[in-house]
Image: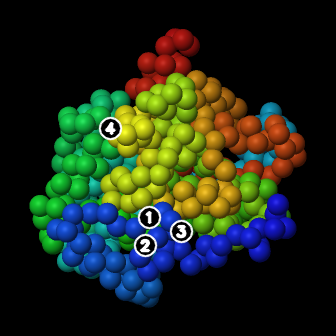
């Protein structure tokens, strides 16, 4: 399979194309009122992502304020328990506690150059909200965060963090009251003021150029990890594993490895409480193609095309769509996507905490499940895990689930 990859796989550097397409996925499906704003954003992305001054400021802020590069940690005890060589790319060590700061900081810097007066953002688990609030504070810009009422309740520590950083947090009580509803409200806000407002989208989805922009800003994860693992382990991994909701941390890890034929790419979605529609958030595992939030990708929808509510113990993966680049990677066979249910995810979180002294985010623990499966099926393999965030924010959920049996 790996020997055929170089000749049968498409040129991934060619995506997205001029229409914002990743193969048949992606594109731009938005109201006409947003087209000028997206055009301005696309021109800004084209201009500033290659601008030396912009890149110098971004790199400096990532280093001196956000804490990059994040370390690559050998998980010694998990390696022994699983029978493999396990490495953790520690995005939990970045400022605000997750990979989200890479994207939020980059987009806020871009917003200033585009002349925006305020930042808006959506959030599920709260990490993109916290990162957006922090980046806006750093750049001296007002910030409004839209968050589903369900997530406001289950991720209350992050709500407090956002407010301490000066952001206004809007609890969304419409729709499913989770990430999907928060994105809907953020888009409504943007439509009302597309010139003065910058929408800092938190994942690698939405209308073009957002999937490309977020991928480029998050690719710092994979670029660092690729160099670090070669230096520390003496070679590339056999597999790179990451959790997948909208897909920003996963595409950030995967993209710098996508042309390495010998490196498998494994994404782990939220399997929730079962395989039935509405019981999980495993879009690539159980979904079908359709349009949501401005992009054509895989969705969890019924036979009539109605997008369905989802379930996951993790607020950050609780979304019925996925970024279009992941849909491309799956469709052409370059990446494999599986799911992990709530129970095994919480068990993996506890295993990592107990044996490595690292409390992962519940989202991240899905990747731990996938990595453990891979290790047991491939003894002695070298596994790179995108350790996307830390679990402090999840303590209210953990108190109601795994900790209640331990107290």
For the N terminus, the image quarter is: bottom right
Q: What is the distance, in whole Å, between disc 3 and disc 4 at their CAs? A: 29 Å
Using a 10 Å C-alpha cutoff, classify the residue at mark 2 as few (fewer than 14 neighbours), some (14 to 19) or many (20 or more): many
Q: What is the distance, in whole Å, between disc 4 and disc 1 at their CAs? A: 23 Å
Percent across and percent down for residue 308 are: 38, 36
Percent across and percent down for residue 400 are: 44, 18
Secondary structure at badge 2 equals loop
In the rendered view, does 388 fall on the left or right side of 64?
A: right
Q: Which residue is mark 4?
A: 178
Indicate which label's residue lies in the foreground, 3 or 4: 3
Q: Which residue is mark 3?
A: 23
CB contact under 8 Å: marks 4 and 1 = no
Using a 10 Å C-alpha cutoff, classify the residue at mark 4 as few (fewer than 14 neighbours), some (14 to 19) or many (20 or more): many
CB contact under 8 Å: marks 2 and 3 = no
Q: What is the distance, in whole Å, between disc 2 and disc 3 at their CAs? A: 9 Å
Label located before the other in sequence (4 or 1): 1
Using a 10 Å C-alpha cutoff, classify the residue at mark 1 as few (fewer than 14 neighbours), some (14 to 19) or many (20 or more): many
Label located before the other in sequence (1 or 2): 2
Percent across and percent down for residue 323 are: 47, 57
Q: Residue furthest left?
A: 192
The circle on residue 61 is none
Indicate which label's residue lies in the foreground, 2 or 3: 3
- Out of 286 and 205, give the one closest to the viewer: 286
CB contact under 8 Å: marks 1 and 2 = yes
Q: Residue at x 54, y 40 (%)?
A: 286
Q: Which residue is mark 1?
A: 26
Q: Which residue is mark 2?
A: 20
């Amino acid at each position: 399979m790996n020997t055929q990859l170089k000749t049968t796989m498409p040129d991934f550097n060619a995506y997205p194309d001029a229409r914002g397409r990743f193969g048949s996925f992606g594109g731009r499906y938005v109201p006409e009122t947003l087209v000028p704003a997206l055009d301005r954003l696309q021109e800004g992305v084209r201009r500033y992502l290659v601008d030396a001054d912009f890149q110098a400021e971004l790199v400096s802020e990532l280093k001196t304020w956000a804490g990059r590069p994040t370390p690559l940690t050998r998980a010694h005890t998990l390696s022994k328990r699983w029978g493999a060589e396990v490495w953790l790319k520690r995005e939990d060590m970045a400022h605000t506690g997750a990979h989200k700061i890479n994207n939020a900081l980059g987009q806020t810097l871009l917003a200033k150059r585009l002349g925006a007066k305020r930042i808006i953002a959506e959030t599920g688990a709260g990490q993109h909200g916290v990162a957006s609030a922090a980046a806006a504070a750093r750049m001296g810009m007002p910030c409004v965060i839209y968050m589903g009422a369900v997530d406001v309740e289950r991720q209350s520590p992050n709500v407090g963090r956002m407010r301490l950083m000066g952001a206004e947090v809007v609890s969304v009580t419409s729709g499913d009251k989770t990430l999907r509803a928060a994105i809907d409200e953020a888009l409504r806000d943007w439509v009302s003021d597309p010139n003065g407002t910058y929408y800092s989208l938190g994942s690698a989805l939405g209308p073009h150029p957002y999937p490309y922009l977020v991928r480029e800003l998050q690719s710092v994860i994979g670029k660092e990890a690729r160099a670090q693992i070669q230096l520390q382990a003496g070679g590339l991994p056999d597999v790179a594993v990451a959790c997948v909701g909208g897909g920003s941390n996963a595409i950030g890890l995967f993209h710098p490895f996508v042309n390495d034929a010998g490196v498998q790419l494994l994404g782990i979605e939220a399997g929730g409480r079962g395989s039935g529609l509405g019981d999980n958030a495993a879009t690539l595992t159980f979904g079908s193609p359709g349009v949501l939030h401005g992009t054509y990708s895989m969705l969890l929808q019924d036979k009539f095309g109605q997008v369905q509510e989802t379930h996951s113990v993790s607020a950050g993966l609780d979304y019925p769509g996925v970024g279009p680049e992941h849909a491309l990677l799956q469709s052409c066979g370059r990446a494999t996507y599986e799911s992990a249910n709530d129970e095994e995810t919480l068990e993996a979180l506890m295993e990592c905490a107990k044996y490595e002294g690292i409390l992962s985010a519940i989202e991240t623990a899905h990747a731990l499940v996938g990595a453990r499966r891979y290790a047991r099926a491939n003894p002695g393999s070298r596994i790179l895990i995108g350790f996307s965030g830390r679990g402090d924010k999840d303590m209210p959920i953990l108190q109601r689930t795994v900790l209640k049996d331990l107290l």
